[in-house]
């Protein structure tokens, strides 16, 4: 009887515990449903009940109207200043030993100016020898002409023989031909002698001199001393454009150039772009003209910004105001609803980004009140204010 009584009590206790557990689970489920209903009602009341909304704490923000402007995207590259006219002075002959250098580094020179003199002693000797022979033949020709004239006068008086007259005439003609040949020889010798004078073929500045008096000079920088002339009034910017931009950049594309060493900047355009990709650079060689009067120097570093995309009259905002969630990108704008200022979530589709600016393709228009400060932690529908309490 004692055992039976004990088993009966245990069964009653177990039944009571299970019932309580079931009641607890039911109450928890009912509470969850009630909490959801309460939250939904509170949200609806917050939207509809002015007095309830006014009891919320408005969050302080800064607002900036969205403006339309021309959005520009640039390809940022590094280039150098180069000269369109860099000339290495060369002699008109095979060269020779330098006797005198008549310019120094930094001199401003003009086209046709005498730069240096080469040894022309052999050429001078040839000129002197040819001149002496010319003088001798000229004297002989004068004598032959005189003899011929006398013989002709005698022949006109029927004195002498025709053979003698013809011989004297032939002698004159032979000496005339000989004189012409010697005169041509003198001219050739003088031209060779004058080739020892080396002149500049361009206007510019003497940029570098490695040649020295006494050395053999032929003007080839790979074979010896040279004199380099640079025309600083005809400069260009050279850079290399990555091959993936080949279809975006063409001749005439706008370029902004900054020379940081001298704190100068200017606008120009692409004047040349190669049609083939460099095998080592994997890019396209591009050039842009430097406006006159910039007073730049070849080989200075240039920061090159090539315009590769533009969108006129586009909504442009600061990239920091752009946010992300599981649905995509969005911004927060301030909307006037009755007498309240409410934060509203606005989904956007962006275009290009450059620096701290981003182009908005869809979602914003001019005049929208973009929340630019204090937007962190704000949710859609939150009460906001632009006034400090």
Image (cartoon, rainbow, N blue to C red):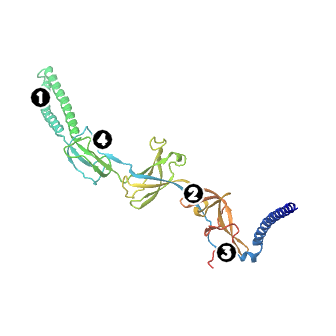
- Would you say 250 lies left or right of 86 here? right
Distance, label 1 to label 4, CA atoms, is 62 Å
Q: Upstream in the sequence, badge 2 or badge 4?
A: 4
Question: According to the image, label 4 marks what residue?
Answer: 222
Q: Quadrant of residue 197?
A: top left
Q: Upstream in the sequence, badge 1 or badge 3?
A: 3
Q: Position of residue 294 (x, y in %)?
A: 39, 58
Q: Position of residue 356 (x, y in %)?
A: 55, 61
| Residue name at image x 26 percent, y 40 percent | 218
- Would you say 386 lies left or right of 192 here? right
Above or below for 104 versus 18:
above
Along the line of sight, the residue nearer the viewer: 288 or 8: 8
Give the residue furthest to the right: 1
Depth check, mark 1 against mark 4: the one in front is 4
Helix, strand or loop at mark 4? loop
Neighbours of disc 1 within 10 Å: few (<14), some (14-19), many (20+):
some
Distance, label 2 to label 1, CA atoms, is 100 Å
Question: According to the image, label 1 marks what residue?
Answer: 147
Distance, label 1 to label 3, CA atoms, is 130 Å
Distance, label 4 to label 3, CA atoms, is 78 Å
Confirm or deny contact between disc 2 and disc 1 (CB under 8 A): no
Depth check, mark 3 against mark 2: the one in front is 3
Question: According to the image, label 2 marks what residue?
Answer: 353
Confirm or deny contact between disc 2 and disc 4 (CB under 8 A): no
Distance, label 3 to label 2, CA atoms, is 33 Å
Depth check, mark 1 against mark 3: the one in front is 3
Question: According to the image, label 3 marks what residue?
Answer: 58
| Residue name at image x 17 percent, y 24 percent | 170
Q: Upstream in the sequence, badge 2 or badge 1?
A: 1
Helix, strand or loop at mark 2? strand
> How many badges with numbers are in the image?
4
């Amino acid at each position: 009887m004692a055992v039976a009584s004990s088993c009966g009590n245990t069964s009653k206790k177990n039944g009571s515990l299970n019932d309580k557990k079931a009641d607890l689970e039911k109450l928890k489920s009912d509470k969850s449903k009630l909490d959801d209903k309460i939250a939904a009602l509170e949200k609806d009341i917050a939207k509809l009940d002015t007095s309830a909304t006014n009891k919320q704490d408005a969050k302080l923000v800064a607002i900036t109207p969205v403006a339309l402007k021309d959005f520009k995207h640039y390809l940022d590259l590094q280039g150098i200043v180069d000269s369109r006219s860099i000339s290495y002075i060369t002699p008109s002959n095979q060269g020779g030993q330098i006797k005198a250098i008549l310019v120094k580094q930094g001199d401003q020179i003009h086209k046709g100016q005498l730069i240096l003199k080469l040894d022309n002693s052999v050429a001078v000797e040839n000129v002197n020898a040819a001149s002496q022979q010319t003088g001798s033949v000229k004297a002989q020709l004068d004598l032959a002409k005189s003899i011929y004239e006398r013989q002709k006068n005698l022949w006109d008086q029927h004195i002498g023989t025709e053979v003698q007259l013809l011989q004297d005439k032939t002698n004159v003609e032979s000496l005339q031909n000989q004189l012409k040949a010697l005169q041509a020889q003198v001219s050739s010798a003088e031209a060779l002698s004058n080739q020892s004078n080396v002149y500049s073929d361009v206007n510019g500045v003497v940029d570098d001199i490695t040649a020295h008096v006494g050395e053999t000079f032929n003007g080839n920088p790979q074979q010896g001393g040279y004199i380099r002339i640079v025309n600083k009034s005809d400069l260009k910017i050279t850079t290399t454009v990555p091959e993936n931009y080949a279809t975006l950049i063409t001749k005439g594309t706008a370029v902004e150039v900054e020379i940081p060493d001298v704190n100068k900047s200017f606008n120009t355009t692409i004047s040349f772009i190669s049609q083939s990709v460099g095998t080592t650079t994997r890019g396209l060689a591009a050039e842009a003209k430097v406006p006159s009067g910039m007073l730049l120097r070849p080989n200075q570093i240039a920061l090159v910004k090539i315009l590769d995309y533009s969108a006129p009259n586009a909504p442009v905002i600061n990239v920091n105001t752009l946010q992300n969630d599981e649905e995509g990108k969005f911004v927060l704008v301030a909307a006037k609803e009755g007498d309240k200022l409410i934060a509203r979530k606005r989904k956007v589709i962006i275009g290009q980004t450059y620096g701290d600016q981003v182009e908005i393709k869809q979602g914003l228009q001019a005049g929208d009140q973009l929340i630019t400060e204090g937007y962190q932690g704000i949710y859609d529908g939150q009460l906001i204010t632009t006034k400090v309490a």
